[in-house]
Image: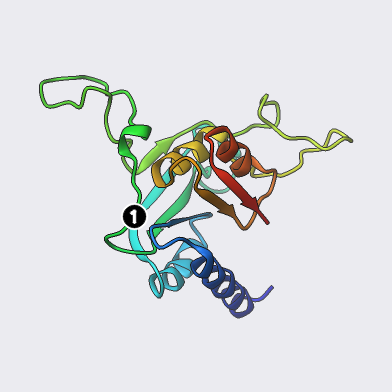
């Protein structure tokens, strides 16, 4: 697919996501840092930018001719600037140190999330009946749970237009959300 064709296709599926998203809904787009700059202007046309999250992992692919890739970008946008869901208490993480100013149940996870990748030998890895890996970039359920907990409530619908191995749906169901995967 050529770049112009890719951008038209991307604009189309983002517009469809906007169309079906609840008024208080959020959209998270995960991708390689090389392509994120092309996607942001499309999102900026319809949504409100909130964060660019770095999904950082220590076990990236080995490289011999460049620096090893150790992160992916997650763009976090909301449909409405003032009407949204953000359940911070559901996603707090342990603080390294606590003092009188610390929140008693932990701190905001910030915008750099270190979560281990799903490796070829992980228990979480989905494989085909012939033993081959079902999807090369399967996302960890812990990552998707954080996103789902942050931006939805029980009974809400979670849409994943690029379902892959179904990890998003598995996380949504486990968290008592409804799930639609395409």
Using the image as rendered, state which of residue 58 and residue 119 is in the foreground. 119
Viewed as shown, does residue 1 lie left or right of 57?
A: right
Q: How was the colour assigned to the protein in this rendering? A: rainbow
Q: Position of residue 152 (x, y in %)?
A: 43, 46
Classify residue 131 by image quadrant: top right
Query: Is the residue 40 above or below the residue 145 in the image?
Result: below
Q: Residues within 10 Å of mark 1 (few under 14, many from 20)?
A: some
Quarter of the picture containing the C terminus is: bottom right
Query: Is the residue 161 above or below the residue 92 in the image?
Result: below
| Secondary structure found at label 1 | loop
Query: Is the residue 52 above or below the residue 137 in the image?
Result: below
Looking at the image, the residue that sits furthest to the front is 155
- Identified at 64% across, 55% down, the residue is 162
Viewed as shown, does residue 8 lie left or right of 130?
A: left
Using the image as rendered, state which of residue 59 and residue 43 is in the foreground. 43
Looking at the image, the residue that sits furthest to the right is 130
- Identified at 53% across, 65% down, the residue is 20
Q: Position of residue 150 (x, y in %)?
A: 39, 42
Using the image as rendered, state which of residue 21 and residue 182 is in the foreground. 21
- Identified at 39% across, 67% down, the residue is 47
């Amino acid at each position: 697919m050529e770049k112009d064709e890719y951008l038209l296709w991307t604009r189309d599926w983002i517009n469809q996501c906007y169309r079906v998203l609840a008024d208080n809904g959020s959209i998270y787009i995960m991708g390689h840092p090389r392509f994120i700059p092309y996607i942001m202007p499309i999102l900026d046309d319809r949504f409100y930018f909130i964060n660019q999250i770095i999904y950082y992992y220590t076990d990236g692919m080995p490289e011999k001719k460049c620096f090893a890739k150790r992160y992916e970008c997650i763009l976090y946008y909301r449909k409405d600037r003032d009407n949204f869901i953000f359940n911070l208490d559901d996603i707090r993480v342990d603080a390294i140190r606590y003092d009188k100013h610390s929140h008693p149940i932990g701190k905001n996870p910030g915008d750099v999330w270190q979560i281990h990748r799903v490796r070829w030998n992980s228990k979480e890895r989905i494989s085909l009946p012939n033993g081959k890996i079902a999807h090369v970039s399967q996302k960890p359920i812990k990552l998707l749970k954080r996103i789902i907990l942050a931006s939805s409530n029980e009974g809400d619908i979670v849409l994943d237009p690029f379902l892959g191995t179904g990890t998003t749906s598995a996380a949504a169901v486990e968290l008592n959300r409804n799930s639609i995967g395409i």
